[in-house]
Image (cartoon, helix red, strand yellow):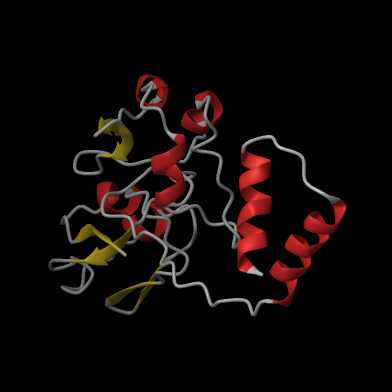
Amino acid sequence: MSDRDERYYNAQLNMQQCSRRGLFRALWSGVSKPVKASTQIAAIRSVPRPPTAVEEALLNRLCDGCGKCEEVCPQHVISMLEEKPTLTLDGGSCTECGECQRVCPTLSLANTSANGVPSTGAVAALSGMCVRQMGAPCQSCEEACPHQAIDTVNRSVSIKTELCSGCAQCRVACPSHAIQMVMR
């Protein structure tokens, strides 16, 4: 029966006619087969992307490397790496203004996240000695975070990674450079 299925699809690809019986046989054979479990693993981002970028595999297919997002970024944190938009968060932060999404002709920057928090693929992490841990009354990172992902309680700082978009606004605001951006 698999021969007939192949013949049907070959006929369709070659624009040959197929009988109604052949059509239903091919459709029914696809329905009657057990569904195989999907073994595809979503590609994990290796570099930070603009916050509204689609998943990595789709981005690689959609993005044509035009560079319009790089040109329009008011913070100048988008750069093209291997013809794909990459966030350079070493010296700046993303304000999630949406300009890159607006100018993207291929819709590769048109993702909307399920939980409402955009993601660059990076997340904030404490990497050094926070002045708060030394007793100074600092809340710069908490105030700079647009998603309330940082809590400053007593002398500690806690980062809720599920709320962190990876924009690096907290890293820029930190006076002691105690926050770095790491990939999820």
**Residue at x 15%, y 73% (from the top left corner):** 134
Q: Position of residue 16 (x, y in %)?
A: 71, 37
Residue extending furthest toward the right: 20
Percent position (x, y) of residue 13? 62, 40
Task: List x then y, in percent, for residue 174.
Answer: 24, 54
Q: Nearer the viewer, residue 79 or 134?
A: 79
Q: Is residue 54 above or below residue 64?
A: below
Please state if 122 lies on the left or on the right of 119 as rendered: left
Q: In which quarter of the view is residue 33 placed?
A: bottom right
Q: Is residue 150 above or below residue 180?
A: below
Depth order, front residue of 155/100: 100
For the point 56% across and 39% down, the residue is 110
Q: Quadrant of the N terminus?
A: bottom right
Name the residue rendered at 34%, 48% in the picture.
Answer: 169
- Decide if residue 154 is in sight here: yes
Near-viewer residue (78 or 34): 34
Q: Residue at x 16, y 66 (%)?
A: 127
Query: Which residue is at the far left?
Result: 128
Decide which of 8, 146 is in the foreground and name it. 8
Whether residue 50 is visible to the viewer of this picture, yes or no, is no
